[in-house]
Amino acid sequence: MGKTKSLPSRAQIAEYWRDKRLPNGDEVIRDDYEPSCWACKRWWHNEDESKLINDGNFKALWNHPKYILERCHIHPKALGGSNDVSNLFLMCSQCHEASPDTTNTNLFFEWVQKRTYDKMIKEHWMYDLVKELQSRGIEVSEFFNWYNEDEERWLDAHESMNTHGFKVVNSTLVAGYLSYYLENAV
């Protein structure tokens, strides 16, 4: 039996996928200098990031030990997939665990296209927002109709929001949208 090819580094995998697109046309890598999960798009800030970006050190940035991206087989190794960069995808552990183990690579990429962190967060904070509106006796449809009459209102509401470090948490979104609505619509 032949020797198994070792896994390429995360930087080698990122370099291969750098200019590639998913079947729906979305870029695999949104930003060369923000290593993130290619499925959910979640990224991690790293204290060394600024220096590596300023130095243009793409390889060191993607291989940095603080980025916890796993090298995942698109066509699983156990089902005959190779360790070639074209068969490897960088994902967080949650997405790696949830990804389909199938020889049908089209189904793998369909799953990736449907799994976005932005969508997951929006669904979650939206659930929290609806619960908050209901607890205050605010008609949910009226709230969303008011915002959707002028979509700039969604952006205007962000003026009263901030981040916890580099992350906007769900409670901030709920409070920000609710506060803007109460100050301007009611």
Image (spheres, rainbow, N blue to C red):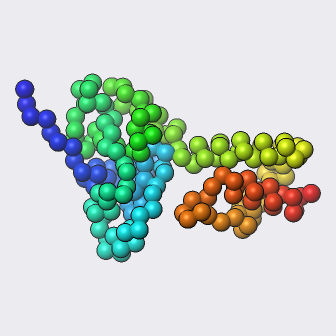
Query: Which residue is drawn at the image coordinates 75% and 57% (left, top)?
Result: 175
Residue in view at x 72 percent, y 45 percent: 128
Count the marks: how many? 0
* Residue sitting farthest toward the right: 186
Q: Where is residue 57 drawn, in percent x and y?
A: 29, 68
Residue 53 makes an appearance in the image: no
Position of 137 with respect to 31 (left or right) is right
Residue for point 46% across, 55% down: 43
Q: Nearer the viewer, residue 64 or 139?
A: 64
Image-quadrant location for residue 22: top left
Q: Horizontally, is 39 left or right of 54 in the view?
A: right
Image quadrant where one finds the C terminus: bottom right
Q: Position of residue 3 (x, y in %)?
A: 9, 34
Residue 184 in view in this figure:
yes
Q: Is residue 36 left or right of residue 177?
A: left
Q: Quadrant of the N terminus?
A: top left
Q: Position of residue 82 (x, y in %)?
A: 22, 34
Which residue is outermost to the left? 1
Residue ID at (41%, 64%)? 46
Q: Position of residue 59 (x, y in %)?
A: 27, 61
Asked whether 73 or 45 is in front, the reply is 45
